Image: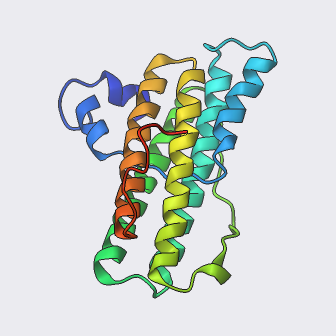
């Protein structure tokens, strides 16, 4: 099933409403998704060009894999207390669902889905406490919000843009939850920049 299939299904499991309710994604290196689309536009490709959408979705897919690895690192660190560990595993599960969905969507659009890297470089030397792990995850979630904020308007397929916008909302919720767990204001400003 792809993004497009999710959006075309009536109000049932797997429908747009169900999709909105359960999606979540974490990205790092957020400019990648935005740049992938902007580069295509700069090269004269139209916003409706499927290859541009494939590049943007593949950037998101690569970042999904990185997020899965980051949450695995946090889960295995031994630094997370039980309720926080459960939340990290939940978020990781959502990232796995998104990676699967993004991969299928890229293939449906005629592209070749990117693969996860064999190894990711994370600031493990700076992760000494639960708060450090939460701060790292919050930074990744904020980056995801920024990436989707940049990707939504440059996706040529409006249904893909709507799906990306729904993930944007979930990313913002993840970021707010992590900030709250850190004792920080969950919503630091009225606008995301």
Name the residue: 34% across, 30% down: 6
| Residue 95 vertical position relative to residue 133 in the rendered view, above or below | above
Whether residue 113 is visible:
no
The percent coordinates of residue 127 (x first, y second) are: 58, 80
Extreme residue in the left direction:
12
Observer-nearest of 182 and 137: 182
* For residue 111, above or below residue 58: above
162 vs 142, nearest the viewer: 142
Residue 53 placement (x, y as % from top left) = 61, 26
Position of 70 with respect to 112 (left or right) is left
Residue 185: image quadrant is bottom left
Can residue 16 be seen at all in this image of the molecule? yes
Left or right, 22 with respect to 37, comes to: left
Residue at image coords 21%, 23%: 10
> Number of marks in the image?
0
Residue 127 position (above or below residue 95)? below
68 lies above or below 33: below
The structure residue drawn at horizontal position 65% and vertical position 16%, both measured from the top left corner, is: 49
Q: Position of residue 47 (x, y in %)?
A: 63, 14
Quadrant location of the C terminus?
A: top right
Query: How are the colours assigned in the image?
Result: rainbow
Picture coordinates of residue 51, whole percent (x, y) = 67, 23
Residue drawn 45% across the image and 55% down it: 96
Q: Nearer the viewer, residue 189 or 174?
A: 189
| Quadrant occupied by the N terminus | top left
């Amino acid at each position: 099933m792809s993004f497009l299939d999710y959006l075309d299904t009536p109000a049932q499991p797997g429908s747009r409403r169900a999709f909105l309710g359960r999606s979540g994604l974490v990205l790092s290196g957020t400019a990648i998704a935005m740049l992938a689309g902007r580069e295509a536009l700069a090269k004269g490709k139209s916003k409706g060009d499927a290859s541009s959408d494939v590049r943007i979705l593949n950037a998101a897919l690569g970042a999904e894999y990185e997020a899965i690895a980051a949450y695995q690192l946090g889960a295995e660190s031994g630094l997370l207390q039980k309720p926080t560990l459960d939340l990290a595993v939940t978020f990781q599960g959502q990232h796995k669902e998104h990676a699967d969905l993004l991969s299928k969507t890229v293939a449906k659009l005629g592209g070749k889905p990117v693969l996860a890297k064999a190894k990711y470089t994370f600031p493990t030397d700076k992760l000494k406490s639960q708060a450090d792990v939460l701060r790292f995850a919050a930074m990744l979630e904020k980056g995801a919000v920024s990436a989707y904020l940049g990707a939504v308007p440059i996706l040529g397929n409006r249904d893909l843009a709507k799906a990306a916008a729904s993930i944007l909302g979930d990313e913002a919720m993840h970021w707010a939850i992590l900030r709250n767990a850190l004792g920080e204001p969950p919503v630091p400003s009225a606008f995301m920049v």
